[in-house]
Image: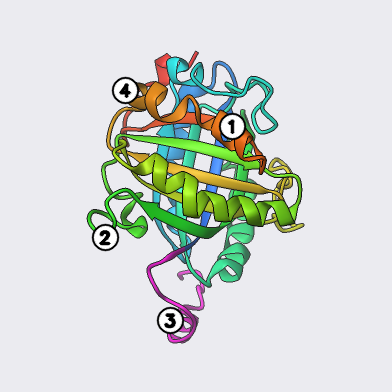
């Protein structure tokens, strides 16, 4: 006899609530596998957790994994990052889009499924969460105006690189000013003529109190912004020109401090590509 799954409830749920395509929320999770466990972690994440712990959940509709080989890790700054300690920590990052307006429903499911996965011994323990949070979408800016992929395409389009930028402001009021400056001045100027097709801006939200204990509570809920730059070139090719000086630009605005600037390339699903290049 099959297990009762309350299948009749799904028809009721499908008839109510938002179901647009806009990425109203994101899950951004940067993780460091423990030394010696890199291959096992990669296989567990791709073969099980990416699906059972993310893509199979309601209202996550796009995802992509990225990796930082050792040479990419060494491009990161600042050395005294408030996000990654040391700044090279967190060689894998996964990014997921969640349908706008469905954050609460998704959170109920993700907490429950992760408790089940943990109980069923389907959670790889030899890893450290460096920077993991759900985040609310604030803005997307495009290099080519209305031409090219939109933000809801970003995790499916074959972008060649991702740069993660985390900025901290002094307080919530200053963060509002920072967002305005980024959106109206800084980001449009930086996108023009660059290898970045778009940049999305998110702000973190606190994790629920019943989250899994191995995931630390989110820092900077009132003061932090996370930027995801989607690149049409390998980040090594445009780092000096496009990203090496961004920390100085933000500091010069007087509105915040870059706490992480980190480049990644996409993983190749179903393979262990780059696993031997992490250390």
Q: Earlier in the sequence, mark 2 or mark 4?
A: 2
Q: Secondary structure at mark 4?
A: helix
Residue 65 spot, x, y in % from top left: 41, 39
Earlier in the chain: of badge 3 and badge 2, it is: 3
| Mark 3 / mark 4, whichever is N-terminal | 3
The residue drawn where x is 61% and y is 63% is 107
Left or right position of 7 against 152: right
User: For this view, does 227 lie left or right of residue 229?
Assistant: right
What residue is shown with label 1? 260
Q: x, y (%) of residue 188?
A: 40, 48
Q: Nearer the viewer, residue 219 or 258?
A: 258
User: Helix, strand or loop at disc 2?
Assistant: loop
Asked if residue 76 lies left or right of residue 233, the reply is: right
Per the model, the C-alpha gap separating discs 3 and 4 is: 45 Å
Say if 69 sits above or below 207 in the image. above
- Is residue 52 in sight in this rendering? no
Residue matched to label 4: 237
* Highlighted range, magenta: 1-23
Number of numbered markers:
4
* In magenta stretch: residue 13: yes
Residue at (59%, 32%) from the top-left corner?
Answer: 260
Q: CA distance from mark 3 to mark 2?
A: 31 Å
Q: Main secondary structure of the magenta part?
A: loop
Res. 235 image quadrant: top left
Q: Label 2, label 4: how many angstroms apart (C-alpha)?
A: 26 Å
Give the labeled residue for mark 3: 14
Q: What residue appears at the point 58 percent right and 58 percent down from the top-left corner?
A: 110
Circle 1/circle 3 CB separation < 8 Å: no
- Residue holding disc 2: 146
């Amino acid at each position: 006899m099959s297990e009762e799954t309350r299948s009749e409830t799904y028809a009721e749920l499908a008839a109510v609530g938002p179901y647009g395509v806009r990425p109203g929320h994101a899950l951004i999770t940067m993780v460091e596998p423990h030394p010696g466990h890199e291959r096992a972690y990669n296989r567990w994440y791709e073969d099980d957790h990416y699906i059972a712990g993310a893509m199979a959940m309601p209202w996550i509709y796009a995802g992509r994994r990225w990796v930082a080989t050792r040479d990419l890790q060494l491009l990161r700054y600042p050395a005294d990052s408030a996000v990654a300690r040391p700044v090279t920590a967190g060689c894998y990052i996964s990014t997921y889009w969640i349908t706008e307006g469905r954050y609460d429903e998704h959170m109920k499911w993700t907490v429950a499924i992760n408790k089940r996965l943990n109980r069923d011994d389907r959670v790889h323990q030899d890893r450290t969460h460096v920077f993991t949070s759900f985040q609310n979408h604030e803005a997307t800016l495009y290099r080519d105006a209305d031409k090219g992929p939109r933000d809801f395409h970003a995790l499916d389009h074959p972008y060649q690189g991702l740069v993660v930028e985390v900025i901290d402001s002094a307080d919530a009021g200053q963060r509002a000013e920072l967002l305005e400056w980024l959106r109206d001045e800084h980001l449009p100027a930086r996108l023009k003529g660059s290898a970045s097709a778009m940049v999305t801006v998110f702000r973190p939200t606190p994790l629920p109190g019943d989250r899994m204990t191995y995931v630390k509570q989110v820092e900077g809920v009132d003061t932090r912004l996370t930027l995801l730059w989607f690149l049409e070139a390998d980040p090594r090719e445009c780092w000096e020109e496009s990203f090496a000086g961004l920390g100085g630009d933000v500091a010069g605005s007087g509105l915040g401090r870059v706490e992480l600037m980190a480049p990644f390339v996409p993983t190749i699903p179903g393979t262990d590509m780059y696993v031997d290049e992490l250390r």
